[in-house]
Image (spheres, coloured by chain):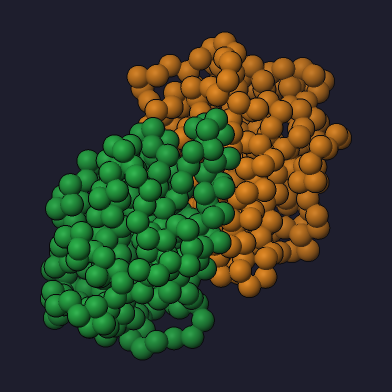
Chain colours: A orange, B green
């Protein structure tokens, strides 16, 4: 497993400590939950309803949390007012079905900042100082909030923003997939027993979770299973 | 006006650019809105409903935004699940009526991080790169997210987390009250024409906005008006 950043790859031992894991219902975050649990953390999953068109990923998130033995599952509802201007939330904007240059139209303003801020609040209330999320700088290089510098900056912020952070400097933001290819993620997750059939990656999945097979997210997922030489369990419509 | 931090005091000229101003309905954020408008920004106010017991501050926020000529007013609803464990939100915890040591029980986990994260999303959608908020490191030294280092860290994060930030590094977080005493804030706001009678600071205000006169926030406000030698327009119950 190649790692170009110290956050990438297996987490340091959790020794039973609580961790807050951001869960989207997709392939990446399911792998992070499995990896965090495997490292010995008591995992509290947090998913976000931000008005995304692909609602079935929220159903998937709950199923994944249960299947992977999360201690708790929270669905945090976010006000859609803060999330306009993205093809993932606006009915007037179509999800592109071919690769695009630069920052994609599926980028949601400040999304990972908002998600991590809420996760930090949950962590502080739970007494947890470990956060884990499935950002990836390889396939999502066009998203500013999926890069190592962003994760570093949020970790620094967490240790200044909170009671526990100021007192101990203990907050860690784990991004175990940061520098992995999709195939590496799938191979790792397969060894960890991630139930990929439960996950939904498609930006325009049906209510039942069937994938379009054409959007960027579907394309990356399909190519990942092919490259990993793992059978693709995705239900395509 | 004493300033111990370059962010404190009047803002640099806005020249008509849009700015997102966090508005709570209290005295401090009303002063920030007036100061941001006076510096020449087109101000978009954002208030947060996070299940606070003192609901009348939200009514006050809207009235203040209108009175001070904000271009828009957004009330963003936040999921109360992310805000447990504070005397400001939990019915089981009483608001203290005498000064306390250390981080007060009225501290809300990661509150300013969550507020700023949402403001950042609004700013990015509006094309604004200026954020302003009324944090104060003098009276609220016990709150980790009211200190200069926190503001610096959030500004750094904003410039890594967003499309515009990465491309231009233009995000600025203005905290004009950061190093001011309550009396200095009130004197400044009075010269700017802030309608303090509309503002609600009390942590346990009545539905009509009448103040208890006993909580920390009331005490600071009352002493501020006295020290500023400005008539206190607060309606006490």
Q: Position of residue A83 (x, y in %)?
A: 40, 36
Q: In the depicted view, which residue is nearer to us: B54 or A147?
A: A147
Q: In the depicted view, which residue is nearer to us: B5 or A199?
A: B5
Q: Position of residue A63 (x, y in %)?
A: 58, 41
Residue farthest toward the right in the current orientation of the protein: A1
Dividing the picture into quarters, in which one does residue B134 lie?
A: bottom left
Point 64% across, 16% down: residue: A219
Q: In the depicted view, which residue is nearer to us: B173 or A233?
A: B173
Image vertical order of residue B47 relative to residue B105, above or below: above
Point 63% across, 36% down: residue: A146
Image vertical order of residue B164 relative to residue B67, above or below: above
Total marks shown come to 0
Residue A28 visible: yes
In the shown orientation, is residue B151 left or right of residue B33? Answer: right
Image vertical order of residue B191 relative to residue B118, above or below: below
Dividing the picture into quarters, in which one does residue A144 lie?
A: top right
Point 22% across, 41% down: residue: B71
Q: In the depicted view, which residue is nearer to us: B27 or A168?
A: B27
Q: What is the quadrant of the N terminus of chain A in the image? A: top right
Dividing the picture into quarters, in which one does residue B33 lie?
A: bottom left
Q: What is the quadrant of the C terminus of chain A in the image? A: top right
Q: Position of residue B77 (x, y in %)?
A: 33, 50
Residue farthest toward the top in the current orientation of the protein: A98
Image vertical order of residue B213 relative to residue B158, above or below: below
Residue farthest toward the bottom in the current orientation of the protein: B98
Residue A237 visible: no
Point 77% across, 32% down: residue: A180
């Amino acid at each position: 497993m190649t790692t170009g950043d110290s956050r990438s790859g297996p987490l340091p031992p959790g020794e039973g400590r609580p961790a807050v894991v951001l869960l989207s219902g997709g392939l990446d975050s399911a792998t992070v939950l499995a990896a965090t649990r495997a490292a010995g953390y008591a995992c509290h999953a947090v998913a976000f309803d931000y008005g995304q068109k692909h609602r079935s990923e929220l159903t998937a998130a709950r199923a994944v949390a249960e299947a992977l033995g999360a201690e708790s599952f929270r669905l945090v509802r976010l006000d859609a007012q803060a999330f306009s201007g993205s093809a993932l939330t606006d009915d007037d904007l179509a999800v592109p079905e071919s690769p695009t240059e630069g920052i994609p139209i599926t980028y949601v303003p400040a999304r990972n900042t908002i998600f991590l801020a809420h996760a930090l609040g949950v962590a502080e209330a739970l007494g947890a100082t470990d956060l884990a999320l499935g950002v990836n700088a390889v396939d999502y290089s066009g998203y500013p909030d999926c890069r190592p510098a962003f994760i570093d900056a949020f970790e620094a912020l967490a240790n200044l923003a909170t009671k526990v952070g100021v007192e101990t400097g203990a907050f860690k933001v784990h991004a175990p997939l940061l520098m992995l290819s999709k195939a590496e993620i799938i191979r790792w997750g397969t060894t960890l027993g991630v139930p990929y059939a439960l996950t939904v990656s498609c930006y325009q999945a049906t209510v039942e979770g069937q994938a379009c097979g054409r959007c960027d997210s579907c394309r990356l997922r399909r190519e990942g299973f092919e490259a990993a030489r793992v059978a693709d369990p995705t239900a395509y419509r």
